[in-house]
Image (tube, helix red, strand yellow):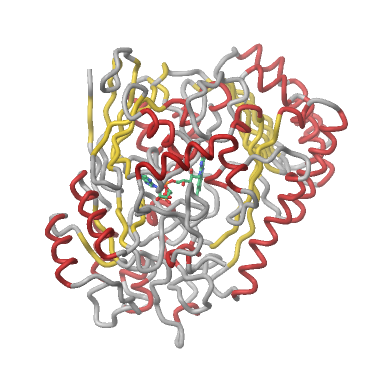
Amino acid sequence: MARSLTFGLTFLFFNAIVHAASGQEPFQTVQTDGSKREWDVLRAAVGNRLFEGVPFAHPCFTQGFNSTACLAVRTGYLDETSRANVPGGYVQTQWETCQVRNDDQCLLSYTNPHDLTPTLPPRQCRIGSIPAHFIDVRNEKDVAAAFTFSRKTKIPLVIKNTGHDYKGRSSAPNSLALWTHNLKAISYNPKFIPDGCSKASPGVTVGAGIQWGDAYAFAETNNITVVGGSDKTVGVTGGWLQGGGHGALSNTMGLGVDRVLQYKVVTPDGRYRIANACQNKDLFFALRGGGGGTFGVVLESTVLASPRVTLQTVIVAFPPSTVRTRELWNILTENGLKWADEGWGGFSTSGIAILLNPKINKEQAATTMRPLIQFGKRLQNEGVQGVQVVVTEFPSWAKFFEAFTKDHVAAVGSSLALASRLISKNNFRTPSSRSSLVSGLLAADAATPGLIILISAPASFPSTGQTSVTDAWRSSVYHVTIVSAWNWNATVEEKKGHYKAVSKSIDNLRRITPDGAYLNEADVYEPNHEVAFWGKHYPELLRIKRKYDPDHLLDCWQCVGWNRKAPRFGCYF
Ligand SMILES: Cc1cc2nc3c(=O)[nH]c(=O)nc-3n(C[C@H](O)[C@H](O)[C@H](O)COP(=O)(O)OP(=O)(O)OC[C@H]3O[C@@H](n4cnc5c(N)ncnc54)[C@H](O)[C@@H]3O)c2cc1C
């Protein structure tokens, strides 16, 4: 039986931001092309749901730093939900700015959003890379109208869902954005049959605005499991599901792209199509790893639902030091292949390992995890303060998520450069390859502190052979990320320096691994990105891109078939 529910906008905050646009002191807006008549036609076609882009921190520059609207911004500045709920909010703030210029931004300080300094003259609130206009998308006709408009006016389109993108692919200067946030339908069908197919599987169908926190709560209510990421406000259907989608259950249950049953998508010719294993198969293949913002605007997706899983969980946390971190990562890598085979997934940083397993029981978990548990207990016996060793069971993914990852999110409200690498099974096979791997991890963490090992590759999940992500995912155990952050007052040279720093830092792992990286969390300046993200699938993806988007209405940074020289990329270095 299908069930559905809808969620509303966070009206108050949204209204505060939108109304700020009509205040006494307009922010420095931009002139976009397109005649008044063309804009009027578009506005009518989308039921008046067309409005100007407004920077998140705009009220703090125009209504007074102590105004109610600015207080809401200051309070929500580091909160991903506040940012994801408004069209002009982005999780990494450089994508709200035009980072090649020092003053084309509207930011507060991420180390202290209550500091007035960034708003003092001569600073002004400028729109940077935030799209000049947004359509609050509610149906396929809105999207078709936007494609018609963009074809006619040449105004670039972007698709903005939650604004989590690490590579700035959901904003662009002087653009028109399709904002999918309010497509909030969600339903469960235990016998979902993709349109035109005959085989039924349990499926959860979500509108493009549904986020993982919504989906996990819904799955819990329905006693099922959906496989998603570790952040509650990343979207289910946008960049995550079309670019790969990994999570702590991916080792045993697959990547997001492995579990899609169907997409409903408006292609650049304005047609609303169904893509699944039985129709528009090439488009289905492309949307399963070719990346968001490239082949069409997905309005709905259906993903496989699995029965509820019981999770065995082992957590060891301690104050990090080079010696202890080396020992932890030695233990993880020595057992890496065995634990991957047994079904363990999870995370590790320099001072913690969180491992979980949906396939085994409590006794088996305690036995196989003995090296890690003993390490934690030894630190406790040595009197190291702040060591925690937790061995426990969770009745579902949602309960685990609630306890451990819901409120532990990556940096929000800062600007940051990220880089990553997929770590192959071969890196775990011999003492010498493991030693090189641990040295590479330690060197990268020393160069850019904050390295995260995500044990989220589909190492023990059989590939369907029907997805377009790089095959490197299939032979990997870890996906490793590093970051380097900067504040509102960084100079252009300093910003460039952060991108260079992460690139250099991840070289410690590039040197010893095959050419594979997760496109959603890669170095913005990934060398050889076509191979790193898609491997042998790139030529076919390019063919599909040209077939469905011959006029190149959709484009994004290092996306399939991108045009590096397009004006929309004017704010990248
Ligand atoms: C804090 C944080 C935690 C993360 N955790 C994980 C994780 O655990 N696992 C993981 O795999 N990734 C993770 N990511 C990376 C995440 O998958 C990407 O940032 C992804 O691009 C976000 O997609 P979005 O749709 O939510 O964001 P947006 O920034 O809105 O969009 C991202 C891209 O998708 C396109 N897009 C959005 N909606 C659509 C649509 N309906 N149709 C077509 N294209 C669309 C956009 O144009 C853009 O190119 C994380 C990111 C952050 C910031």
The quadrant in which residue 335 appears is top right
**Residue 13 to residue 381: above or below:** below
Q: How many numbered discs sit on the rendered protein?
A: 0
In the rendered structure, the answer to whether residue 170 lies left or right of residue 383 reads left
Residue 390 in which image quadrant: top right
402 or 397: nearer the viewer: 397
Horizontal side of 529 relative to 208 (left or right) equals right
What's the residue at 44%, 62% (across, down)?
Answer: 77
Left or right relative to 346: residue 81: left
Q: Residue at x 57, y 15 (%)?
A: 359
Determine the residue located farthest toward the right in the rendered image. Answer: 432
Which residue is at a point 45% across and 73% down the rendered structure image?
105
221 and 414: which is toward the camera: 414
Residue at 64% across / 39% down in the picture?
516
Q: Position of residue 128 (x, y in %)?
A: 42, 71
Please indicate whether residue 36 sits to the left or right of residue 13 in the image: left
The N terminus lies in quadrant: top left
Viewer-side residue, 565 vs 1: 565
Determine whether 476 is above or below 278 in the image. below
- The part of the image, by quadrant, that contains residue 208 is top left
Residue 495 is situated, as x and y percent measured from the top left of the image, at 61, 68
| The C terminus lies in quadrant | bottom right
- Report the residue that reaches farthest toward the bottom: 122
Q: Position of residue 460 (x, y in %)?
A: 61, 20
Which of these two is toward me, 443 or 426? 426
5 w.r.t. 503: above or below:
above
The vertical placement of 297 against 471, above or below, is below
Q: Position of residue 387 (x, y in %)?
A: 72, 38
